[in-house]
Image (cartoon, coloured by chain):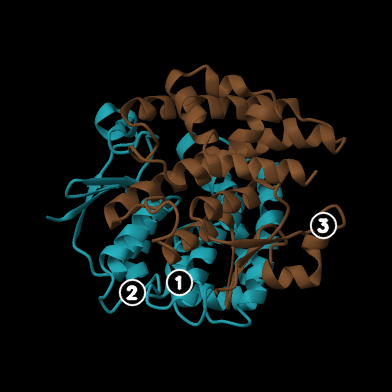
Amino acid sequence: MTIKLYGVAMSTCTAKVLACLHEYGAEFELVPVNLQNGEHKQPAFLAKNPFGQIPALEDGDLTLFESRAISTYVAEKFKGSSCDLLRSQNPKEAALVKTWMEVESQQFSPAISPIFYQSIIVPILHGGSPNQAIIDESAAKLGKVLDVYEKKLSSSKYLAGDFYSLADLHHLTYIYYLMKTPYGKLINERPRVKAWWEDISSRPAFKKVASGLTLGDKN
Amino acid sequence: MATPVTVHGPPLSTAVSRVLACLIEKDVPFQLIPVNMAKGEHKSPDFLKIQPFGQVPAFQDEATSLFESRAICRYICEKYPEKGNKGLYGTNPLAKASIDQWVEAEGQSFNPPSSVLVFQLAFAPRMKLKQDQSLISQNETKLEKLLGVYEKRLGESRFLAGDDFSLADLSHLPNAHYLVNAAEREELFTSKKNVERWWGEISSRDSWKKVVDMQKQST
């Protein structure tokens, strides 16, 4: 039975899981959720994610929500293939992957998501004006986080070590959108962070996903 | 005899107490190393070597170092599956993933508004900082709405991830404890029947009582 991922390709959280699925070459079906019609707040979807957010995953009898829990599940399910994004065989490496996955979750995302929301979601989906004060405050926070990354990346090629892992992957979709805004400079003005971004965003699995990250593109 | 693991940070810190609760549930011996935050010890060069964001806790298990409380908790559960509460992070991949999604929900949805409220209501007055009423009211509304989702979920199962206490429930203890006991927000939990039952059960676990004792003894 095929994995079903409920979500939309242009969503940062859905795409995070798509990148993981592609890295593992997993077979899956992306089932679109009609956000405009409020499908994600209807009982059928709330049964999959009571918080009414995309993505949700179905794998046989298992239903899961929260993109990072889903990607971790995928990585553990397909453990033993040539792809190894959790480094489960090496406890020290696995511990570092866990740590930097939480860094993305607790330090990076809270700083970058208001920039994304104000710069892209507010004007495009709500027809409003970005709140510059929020953007500026978040850009300052993100800068501090990226300063730590810059230092870390001087002693290892990727965040958890000299190996690509889920910790790096989880950053892809927000940074991709950040680069479409003037705040991409936060990445570009830090040479090691910039090199790391160029490396991880050039992975074939991500390129497949990037073509769907179309929010803000002019037709 | 194995060296006890080391936790760096004050028990009063919500993130430190999350790790302590997990260690006690899992019956893993530990040594708690104080960090004098009033004197800025967490920003000292020596501390930044073990936690580059200058936050508590930091953690060591022989040669393995981690930070970020939820990463540390997951690590403890995976490294010591046979110790203490064996089901804390599930005993099979499906159970683990189901627990993980609720640990993520805590980290992504419960933690942000509850952290703001804990700071504004419990810590700011003690630190003689001015409270931000609008921030308090916004986050009360968010948390109230979120607990509505929990109320429904806890009508379907005894604990968040199923019929057994798990890391998902444990993750909520630190912030919820302060909201109930130091911020006069007990009503958030007692105004909903299932949430009240759940809070009563999880907060009366022996492991959490021991953490609360450690917090009291440290003042």
Mark nearest the camera among 1 and 3 is 3
Residue A124 pos. (x, y %): 47, 42
Left or right relative to A106: residue A35: left
User: How far apart in space, not on screen, are marks 2 and 1 (Cα)?
Assistant: 24 Å
Q: Amino acid at mark 2?
A: Pro
Q: Nearer the viewer, residue B28 or A138?
A: B28
Within 10 Å of disc 2 (Cα), the crowding (few <14, some 14-19, many 20+) is few
Give me the chain letter of mark 1. Answer: A
Mark 3 and mark 2 residues within 8 Å of each other at the beta carbon: no
Residue that badge 3 annotates: B36
- Rendered shade, chain A: cyan
Residue that badge 1 annotates: A94
User: How far apart in space, not on screen, are marks 1 and 3 (Cα)?
Assistant: 30 Å
| Residue lying farthest to the front in this orientation | B1
Q: Which chain is brown?
A: B
Q: Amino acid at mark 3?
A: Asn
Within 10 Å of disc 3 (Cα), the crowding (few <14, some 14-19, many 20+) is few
**Numbered disc 2: secondary structure:** helix
Residue B40 pos. (x, y %): 84, 58
Q: Amino acid at mark 1?
A: Ala
Residue that badge 2 annotates: A204
Left or right relative to B206: residue A23: left
Give me the chain letter of mark 3. Answer: B
Q: Nearer the viewer, residue B134 or A115?
A: B134
- Which residue is at a point 71% across and 44% down the rendered structure image? B215
